[in-house]
Amino acid sequence: MKHLIILFTILSFGATAKAQSGTAKLIDWKFLAKVDFEDKYYPEYEAWYLYPVFPKQIKELNGKQVIIKGYVIPMDVTDGTYALSAYPFSNCFFCGGAGPESVLSLKFSGNHKKYETDEVVTFVGTLKLNDTNLEDFNYILENVKEVKP
């Protein structure tokens, strides 16, 4: 009986997510971790940074609708800037416990609720790969909307 309840919950979530997101592809942090990095010198910053080398399977999702679940990290609540992380704040990229592949920018379209640190949320949006703007993360989710279970 317990297994049936778990299966029903998973199937219900999948149906709800699909209904809310159309043809969005469900991805996870293991998938995003398939990126490689090379050291690259940026003269304008006079510093070396990790340059992402996205594999074909990730490049194929650039500009496509995806669904991903993670921990919300408020960056600037005043202007509604948030990141989504594979890990809670205490273990996330900002604290040195994870790499740049474990976090993405959330770019909302329109109004959204105020999210708390480490709130676990599933979002749908358009995945944008970033290998040019050092002021943002390598993964950006645009036109973000929360997926309700």
Image (cartoon, rainbow, N blue to C red):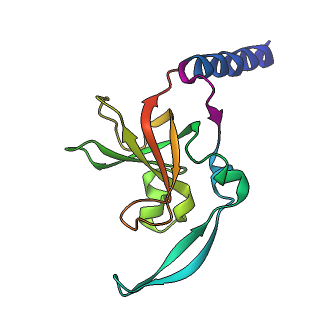
The residue at the point 36 percent across, 87 percent down is 46
| 13, 106: nearer the viewer | 106
Q: Position of residue 137 (x, y in %)?
A: 45, 59
On screen, residue 13 above or below 141: above
**Is 1 on the left or on the right of 80, as rendered?**
right
**Is 108 on the left or on the right of 49, as rendered?**
left
| 128, 121: nearer the viewer | 128
Direction top: furthest residue: 1
The residue at the point 65 percent across, 35 percent down is 26
The residue at the point 48 percent across, 34 percent down is 121
Residue 101 figure quarter: bottom right
Q: Position of residue 44 (x, y in %)?
A: 34, 82
Residue 10 inside the magenta-drawn segment: no
On screen, residue 130 above or below 111: below
Looking at the rendering, in which quadrant would you find the N terminus? Answer: top right
| 1, 89: nearer the viewer | 89
Looking at the rendering, in which quadrant would you find the C terminus? Answer: top right
The residue at the point 63 percent across, 53 percent down is 32
**Is 14 on the left or on the right of 82, as rendered?**
right
Magenta range is 20-26
Residue 38 figure quarter: bottom right
Q: Position of residue 74 (x, y in %)?
A: 33, 47
